[in-house]
């Protein structure tokens, strides 16, 4: 077969030669056997020319003697894959051979040719754009990206798609997503480029995913698509930078290296992508792009595994992540990213898993402080400090300062904007909260939590119709996202649609896996509907649960409030305050506490929280 690598389109299909895959326009991968793919590729490379059977047999089965029936079967299988039942795409010339006549679009298509030519060239006959590719084992020979003098419009938005396994049965999610996340962090560090975060792009991890379809759905101008294969101490990494509008490859390369040189590969990819995007980077930004947080490959692998487990947001996953980050730090105490990862894992435990704030937030703060001592530019660690000051210290001024600083460090990271918006909302600053959460959503258009929080903040600003429309968009993406269902139930309850509220909250309870604050929210709605017996059953259920695990006191307070049991409700709220229950920070904005608003003990609690006079 000719030694060229191409991205080709015809009819309703796209061929990725680097990954040896055929895709439909909607991104679906059409599986072909190796010989059938070779047949397609040879027909494509010699389109509009009659190919006799002897030429095809020699090209597809080089050095082998095979029967003509092998070719017939390969053509038949290819026709089935293309839906070419009438022979309109692959024309049979009786007694001679075959001719590929599938329609192609008139605009040039990308071809990644073997290294040699210094500049791109257009092959008008084949409707392709030829680009040179680095040779095997050479990380320095690559396509020349646009120079400053070229009339090139800089790319403003990018998605680094999850790296794919180059061999189907050798998938290593820790390595694949780890490589993806580190490149995202590096390329977004300077703020000149809006890079979609891992939480948004990870849904495009399927090997069947068409990168251009993903790029259009993510609303970006370019995508970085790649594959990884690790065999023992060796690794191969393939990368392509594609412009979404027309599929043109701005840069492509392949690296065959020792795994010990993984950092050099990351350096090369980061720098060349930045140049290919025509970014005008400052010296400080270039320095950060090349920054290596560790030279210890074992510590790096432990860090990647830790990030993988953090993403699960389960008790077991987060504790596993903590252990992995601690092992990475033991190997390299100066590894700032590992300290930041440890901080992030600890700060999520009280929020995602209802574990004790006193045990976890101080550890989160300590790890974040260590990360910032090693690298003052750590936006992730600064964001963790913002959450600790907000959820645990109840120091609104310092929390705001931390979130603002995190945004300054990485303006294109959504998490600092999300945290800041939550703080502003809890303080009753609804318009500013909406501005910040919209920015977070713009950075992560498909983020379920950003869209859900925007709906919550709209409702708090008495814009319920807009809030429900926003939640509808969440359910379009994931009907099982229980946090959105919880908020939908809350809005229905606020509007007096009690049956709808109870129905939504029942679904949220089931989908959440029996999270305590969802149980109490459902009990509140049932009490509001007059079913006090069921609400009391929920109280008994939470008391039984508290013998096995931590149940925040605010949950008991909420149900007693719904039952109009003022004394017990205030008792539990005061206990929640003593236990640093993070949900006490909602006292100013959560309308469900309205029956307690005039109670002196409630007013005193708000003043202790410095919420009564905050505007």
Image (cartoon, rainbow, N blue to C red):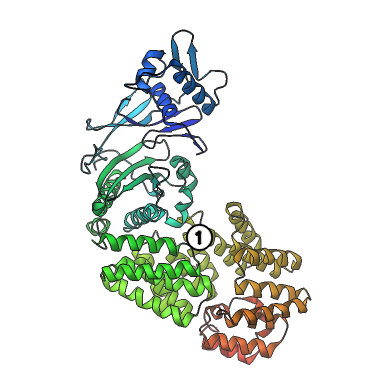
- Tell me where residue 260 sits by quadrant: bottom left
Where does the image place residue 242, in percent across and percent down from the top left?
Answer: 37, 40
* Residue at figure coordinates x 36%, y 70% from the top left: 381
Q: 10 Å neighbourhood of mark 1: few (<14), some, or many (≥20)?
A: many
Q: Position of residue 515 (x, y in %)?
A: 60, 71
Tell me: 181 left or right of 579: left
The residue at 55%/63% (across/down) is 454
Is 22 located above or below residue 496 in the figure?
above
Count of labels in the image: 1
Expressed as whole percent of the image width and height from the top left, the position of residue 154 reads 33, 45
Q: Nearer the viewer, residue 121 or 342?
A: 342
Quarter containing the N terminus: top left
Nearer to us in this view, 594 or 100:
100
Quarter assignment of residue 47: top left
Q: In the displayed image of the protein, which residue is found farthest to the top?
A: 95
Please name the residue shown 44% across and 61% down the image: 414
Compared to residue 1, the image places residue 548 above or below, namely below
Q: The residue tagged with tag 1: helix, strand or loop?
A: helix
Where residue 500 sits in the image (x, y, percent)?
Answer: 73, 64
Asked if residue 502 shows in the view, the reply is yes
Left or right: 26 with respect to 302? right
Q: Which residue is mark 1?
A: 438
Residue 88's place in the image compared with 570, above or below, is: above
Residue 377 visible in the picture? no
Residue 54 vs 103, above or below: the answer is: above
Q: Nearer the viewer, residue 176 or 105?
A: 176
The single residue placed furthest to the right in the displayed view is 530
Q: Identify the residue at horizontal 42%, vertical 31% (top origin).
A: 34
């Amino acid at each position: 077969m000719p030694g060229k690598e191409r991205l080709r389109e015809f009819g309703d299909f796209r061929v990725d030669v680097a990954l040896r895959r055929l895709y439909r326009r909607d991104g679906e991968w059409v599986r072909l056997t190796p010989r059938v793919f070779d047949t397609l590729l040879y027909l494509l490379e010699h389109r509009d020319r009659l190919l006799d059977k002897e030429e095809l047999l020699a090209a597809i089965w080089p050095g082998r003697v095979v029967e003509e029936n092998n070719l017939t079967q390969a053509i038949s299988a290819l026709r089935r894959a293309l839906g070419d039942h009438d022979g309109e795409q692959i024309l049979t010339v009786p007694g001679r051979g075959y001719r590929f006549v599938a329609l192609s679009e008139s605009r040039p298509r990308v071809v990644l040719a073997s290294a040699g030519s210094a500049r791109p060239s257009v092959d008008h006959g084949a409707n392709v754009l030829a680009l040179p590719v680095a040779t095997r084992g050479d990380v320095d020979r690559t396509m020349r990206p646009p120079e400053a003098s070229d009339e090139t419009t800089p790319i403003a938005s990018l998605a680094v798609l999850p790296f794919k396994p180059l061999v189907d049965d050798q998938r290593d999610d820790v390595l694949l997503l780890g490589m993806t996340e580190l490149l995202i962090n590096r390329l977004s560090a300077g703020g000149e480029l809006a890079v979609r975060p891992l939480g948004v792009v990870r849904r495009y991890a399927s090997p069947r995913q068409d990168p251009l379809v993903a790029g259009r759905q993510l609303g970006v101008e370019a995508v970085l698509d790649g594959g990884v294969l690790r065999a023992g101490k060796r690794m191969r990494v393939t990368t392509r930078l594609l412009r979404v509008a027309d599929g043109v490859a701005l840069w492509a390369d392949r690296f065959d290296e020792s795994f010990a040189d993984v950092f050099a590969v990351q350096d090369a990819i980061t720098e060349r992508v930045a140049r290919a995007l025509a970014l005008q980077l400052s010296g400080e930004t270039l320095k950060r792009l090349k920054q290596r947080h560790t030279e210890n490959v074992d510590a790096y692998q432990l860090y990647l595994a830790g990030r993988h487990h953090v993403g699960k947001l389960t008790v077991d996953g987060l504790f596993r992540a903590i252990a992995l980050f601690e092992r990475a730090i033991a190997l390299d105490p100066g590894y700032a990213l590992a300290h930041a990862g440890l901080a992030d894992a600890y700060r999520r435990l009280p929020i995602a898993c209802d574990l004790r704030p006193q045990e976890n937030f101080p550890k989160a703060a300590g790890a974040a402080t260590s990360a910032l001592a090693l690298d003052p530019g750590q936006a992730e660690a600064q964001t963790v400090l913002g959450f600790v000051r907000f959820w645990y210290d109840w120091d609104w001024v310092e929390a705001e300062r931390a979130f603002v600083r995190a945004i300054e460090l990485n303006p294109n990271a959504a998490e600092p904007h999300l945290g800041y918006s939550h703080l502003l909302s809890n303080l009753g600053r609804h318009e500013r909260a909406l501005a910040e959460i919209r920015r977070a959503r713009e950075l992560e258009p498909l983020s379920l939590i950003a869209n859900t929080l925007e709906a919550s903040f709209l409702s708090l600003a008495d814009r319920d119709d807009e809030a429900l429309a926003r939640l509808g968009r969440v359910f379009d993406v994931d009907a099982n996202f229980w946090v959105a269902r919880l908020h939908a139930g809350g809005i229905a309850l606020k509007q007096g649609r009690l049956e709808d509220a109870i129905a939504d909250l029942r679904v949220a309870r089931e989908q959440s896996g029996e999270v305590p604050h969802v149980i109490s929210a459902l009990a509140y709605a049932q009490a509001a509907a007059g079913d006090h017996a069921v609400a009391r059953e929920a109280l008994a259920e939470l008391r039984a649960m508290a013998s096995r695990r931590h149940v925040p006191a605010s949950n008991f307070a909420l149900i007693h409030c719904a039952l109009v049991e003022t004394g017990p409700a205030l008792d539990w709220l005061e206990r929640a305050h003593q236990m640093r229950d993070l949900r006490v920070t909602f006292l100013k904005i959560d309308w469900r506490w309205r029956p307690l608003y005039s109670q002196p003990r409630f007013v005193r609690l708000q003043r202790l929280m410095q919420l009564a006079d905050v505007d």
